[in-house]
Amino acid sequence: MRVLLDGIDHVQLAMPPGGEELATFFYEEVLGVPRVPKPPHLAIRGGCWFERGTLRIHVGVQEDFVPATKAHPAFTVVDLDRMETWLLDRGMTPRRERDPIGPDTLYVDDPFGNRIELRPGRGPVEEPSESTDVVVEVAAETLGERFASQMAFVQELDRLKSVERQSFVLDGLRRENTAEHSWHVAMLAVVLADHADADVDIARVLVLLLVHDIVEIDAGDTGIHDRDHAESKSERELVAADRLFGLLPDDLGSMVRAAWEEYEAAETPEGRFARVFDRLAPFLLNFGADGMPWRRWGVTSVQVRSVLEPIGASAPDLGRFVDAMIDRAVADGHLIDGSSGIILP
């Protein structure tokens, strides 16, 4: 018999008419799966979609709605105990089911009475895959230990493709990953290099942008408006820098780390100009996603102007452009209005 199925595209649940805000509270705010725009031809039916990577939950409107109390989806979580506390703190009533031969399971109802199962997952991958070990082994045998260290670092970089950021790609259907972001900001610097001062070395800017978020392999992405995790960001990234740049031979590791530290300090012309694009790229994506990430964090136009100050400080023309785009985002209802401001120096 031929195997025709190769995965699950999405989970479909039902809700009564008018339940979009309750669904958004539960699936986005409580379970942490962002709401994404539905295609226009489907949006007229009501309902809402929640997606993060390959995890896709679609909640549709059903006029004669009856909650699903037996049939249910089951999702994996990294830490079941932490999830239970998280649910309790938000007024949910999770039900823990003990399993004498396996891990416990949580059940919780969504706002409409649909049963949701939460099970422990495998968590993040900590050890290198067998193929990585083979690459490093063969590299050492053929070209020596220095080359093996370089290959170990290059293999580790692939994990950057799995780090999800807070910004969505322009069509709003998924989040971008950090590898995509690093490429995107580097290309912005190439295309918009004529907005730099004469003393800015664009080649150096590209190095800073390609290096600046490598630490997110271990530290993860901390959104610029994520106040809950901002305090631990520096510590997490320093630990990540020690491990990741330590994979390289000493001279290369020191060179790459110096580029990362130069970007973080933003004291050189190149460091400041690199920061222009690290601010500009997510702004454009947030605008393209109709302000969904801004709404998620409750961000106002005043806060956005504050975050984007480095743009106007290093590239006044781009600052004027962004200032006008903020006004447009407010006018279009994508960004909460605040007191007027200007991001130019």
Image (tube, rainbow, N blue to C red):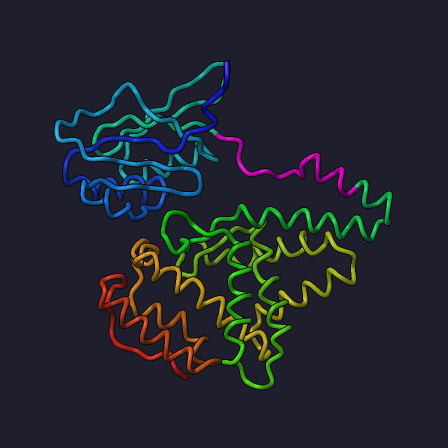
Extent of the magenta region: 121-136
Residue at image coords 48%, 49%: 164
Residue at image coords 42%, 77%: 318
Residue at image coords 57%, 68%: 264
Which of the pair 3/118 is nearer the observer?
Answer: 3
Relative to 307, is 341 above or below? below
Residue 327 drawn at (x, y percent): 27, 72
Residue 4 drawn at (x, y percent): 46, 22
Residue 2 drawn at (x, y percent): 50, 17
Q: Is residue 80 left or right of residue 302?
A: right
Residue 52 drawn at (x, y percent): 41, 43
Residue at image coords 47%, 14%: 100
Relative to 249, is 102 above or below? above
Q: Is residue 36 left or right of residue 279?
A: left
Q: Is residue 74 left or right of residue 136?
A: left
Which of the pair 21/99 is nearer the observer?
Answer: 21
